């Protein structure tokens, strides 16, 4: 088994809250065990500590390594929910977007969103004008407690010339202006998730990655803990708690099945994907909403991610299991790219331009369907004849994960009122991983300069890095540009002290994750 880099310490101690020590963790007492380390598990752990509870979070792979890592990096408000008059979802989304802007401003910022209006479908001035006005009116408190520089301005209609200035490649056929509104952007979502876990750890949570939960421990039908296996050593561990939260995302239904209470409504997966093209962004300042000029054409969002073209989101039915290869086939990518080329004819994109495919599973309305659910699912298994003390959660949106965690914990572990957020202390020492999130596309270290390598050792030691892909993809973003990640992997592996055989295996893991689903690699 691979040795665990994350067990190392600097000078016998660390200022981090994510040191990985399963043996020490086994000897502690926990108020709840959270199964799953994506955004929902992270938020459950954080919200639990705000209530004075002591949680243990167990993740079978790496933190945020599945669907949570593969999203479009937009923290959505609720503009699209106004179309269906779903005001509850609208208000929840606006409030949670504000939470991110207020409490995680180093990771989340305002993002202008521009939709060129060509008079087709919803892209009409007389439709979008009132919609934007309603969006601003109903979200009047969207900037409450948000610092001045992070606030979201009001939206509105803009002229044809203004559209062309912001989006020079716009299709001018029938162009009648544009709709401009503001959402929030989290370009370094991997660092955001790690910071949430560090915050939870700072407040008393224990978070362990590569710890597979094998099953529940029961006493007369009541949960008393979980059995787990350390994937790095093969060692078995047992953790005690009278409450288990199943937040395993695409694996949540499989977990409930293993626990003896199969709930089909918990998670039926649909495939979702976003595509990174090795082309400059359509606009360096705005996300651009475009659609092919034909009836029923899907609206695509092109996001300026590190100056490159990141576009989403595609959806399709999925017939496999969560552990299967969850990537769109070449036919789906070709159709997706064709729609984008029709919307922006000058692009002329082909499969050779696909740099990376971010894909995962989201909950759908029924097995084999591609339509996504609209609301989270919260299940108290003990109330339905299942194990008492087991609760499950399945959510649909990154933005509202904190609010869903709040609802869940009010049922699962009612008790003391949560500490007010402004008084809920975050770690005073920032992670060195932040030094690597703003590397521009094309950046490479100067030949002979090894100074950039040293901070990586500290990150590996303090943030539960077990594998090389943990470090390059989900702690630093050095592999956000795939080719750079592949080029730097050998130097980083050598610097961290892996043997030649280990380094070769670790580099293969990095290559597999970066090139998974890329047509040129099939």
Image: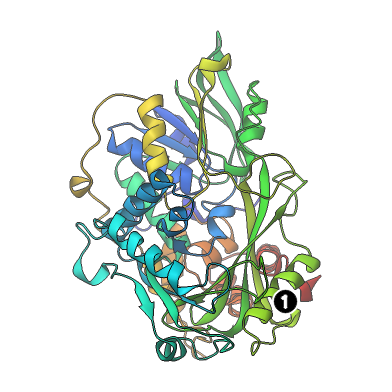
Is 498 placed left or right of 423 in the picture? right
Q: Is residue 336 above or below residue 214?
A: below
Badge 1: few (under 14), some or many (20 or more) residues near its Cα, within 10 Å?
some
Residue at the image point whose x is 53% and y is 71% from the top: 495
Residue hosting label 1: 338
Task: Left or right? Give the position of 304 relative to 521.
Answer: left
Return the x and y of residue 135 as percentages of the image width and height: 35, 60
SS class, disc 1 = helix
Looking at the image, residue 136 sits to the left or right of residue 131; the answer is left
Q: Is residue 267 visible?
A: yes
Q: Looking at the image, which is closer to me, 213 or 68? A: 68
- The C terminus lies in quadrant: bottom right
- Asked whether, in this view, residue 302 is left or right of residue 418, the answer is right
Judging depth in this view, the residue of 39 and 77 nearest the camera is 77
Q: Position of residue 321 (x, y in %)?
A: 74, 43
Q: Residue 23's spot in the image, x, y percent?
A: 48, 36
Q: How is the image coloured?
A: rainbow
Camera-side residue of 267 and 476? 267
Figure quadrant of residue 269? top right
Rendered position, 478 above or below 345: above
Image point 50% across, 78% down: which residue? Answer: 117
Residue beneath the point at 62% across and 38% down: 267
Which residue is farthest front?
126
Q: Position of residue 72 (x, y in %)?
A: 53, 64
Outermost residue toward the top in this view: 220
From where the camera sits, is residue 233 visible?
A: no
């Amino acid at each position: 088994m691979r040795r665990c880099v994350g067990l190392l310490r600097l000078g016998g101690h660390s200022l981090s809250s994510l040191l990985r020590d399963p043996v020490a963790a086994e000897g502690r007492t926990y108020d709840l065990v959270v199964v799953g380390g994506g955004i929902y598990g992270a938020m459950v752990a954080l919200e639990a500590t705000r209530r004075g509870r002591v949680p243990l979070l167990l993740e079978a792979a790496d933190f945020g390594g599945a669907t949570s890592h593969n999203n479009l990096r937009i923290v959505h408000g609720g503009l699209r929910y106004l179309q269906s008059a779903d005001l509850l979802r609208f208000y929840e989304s606006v409030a949670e977007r504000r939470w991110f802007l207020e409490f995680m401003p180093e990771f989340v910022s305002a993002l202008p969103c521009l939709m060129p209006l060509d008079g087709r479908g919803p892209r009409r001035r007389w439709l979008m004008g009132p919609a934007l006005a309603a969006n601003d009116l109903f979200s009047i408190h969207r900037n409450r407690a948000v610092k001045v520089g992070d606030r979201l301005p009001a939206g509105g209609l803009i002229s044809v010339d203004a559209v062309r200035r912001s989006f020079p490649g716009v299709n001018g056929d029938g162009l009648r202006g544009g709709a401009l509104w503001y959402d929030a952007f989290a370009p370094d979502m991997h660092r955001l998730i790690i910071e949430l876990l560090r915050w939870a750890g700072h407040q008393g949570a224990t978070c362990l990655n590569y710890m597979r939960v094998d099953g529940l421990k029961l006493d007369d039908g009541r949960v008393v803990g979980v059995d787990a296996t350390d994937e790095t050593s093969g060692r078995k561990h047992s953790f005690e708690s009278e409450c288990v939260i199943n937040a395993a995302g695409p694996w949540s239904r499989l977990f409930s099945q293993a626990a003896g209470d199969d709930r089909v409504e918990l998670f039926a997966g649909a495939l979702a994907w976003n595509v990174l093209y090795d082309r400059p962004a359509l606009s360096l300042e705005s996300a651009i909403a475009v659609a092919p000029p034909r009836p029923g054409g899907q609206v695509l969002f092109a996001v300026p991610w590190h100056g490159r073209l990141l576009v989403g989101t595609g959806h399709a039915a999925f017939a496999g299991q969560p552990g299967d290869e969850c990537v769109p086939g070449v036919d789906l990518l070709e159709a997706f790219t064709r729609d984008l080329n029709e919307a922006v004819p000058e692009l002329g994109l082909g499969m050779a331009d696909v740099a990376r495919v971010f894909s995962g599973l989201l909950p759908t309305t029924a097995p084999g369907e591609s339509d996504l659910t609209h609301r989270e699912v919260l299940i108290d298994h003990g109330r339905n004849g299942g194990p008492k003390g087991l609760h499950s959660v399945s959510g649909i949106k990154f933005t509202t994960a904190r609010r869903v965690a709040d609802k869940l914990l009010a049922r699962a572990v009612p008790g003391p009122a949560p500490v007010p957020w402004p008084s809920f202390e975050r770690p005073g020492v920032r992670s060195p991983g932040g030094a690597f999130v703003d590397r521009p596309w094309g950046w490479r270290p100067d030949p002979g300069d090894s100074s950039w390598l040293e901070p990586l050792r500290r990150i590996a030691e303090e943030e539960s890095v077990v594998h090389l892909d943990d470090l390059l993809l989900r702690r630093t973003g050095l592999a956000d540009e795939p080719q750079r990640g592949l080029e730097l992997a050998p130097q980083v592996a050598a610097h961290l002290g892996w043997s030649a055989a280990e380094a070769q295996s670790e580099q293969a893991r990095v290559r597999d994750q970066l090139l998974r689903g890329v047509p040129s690699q099939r």
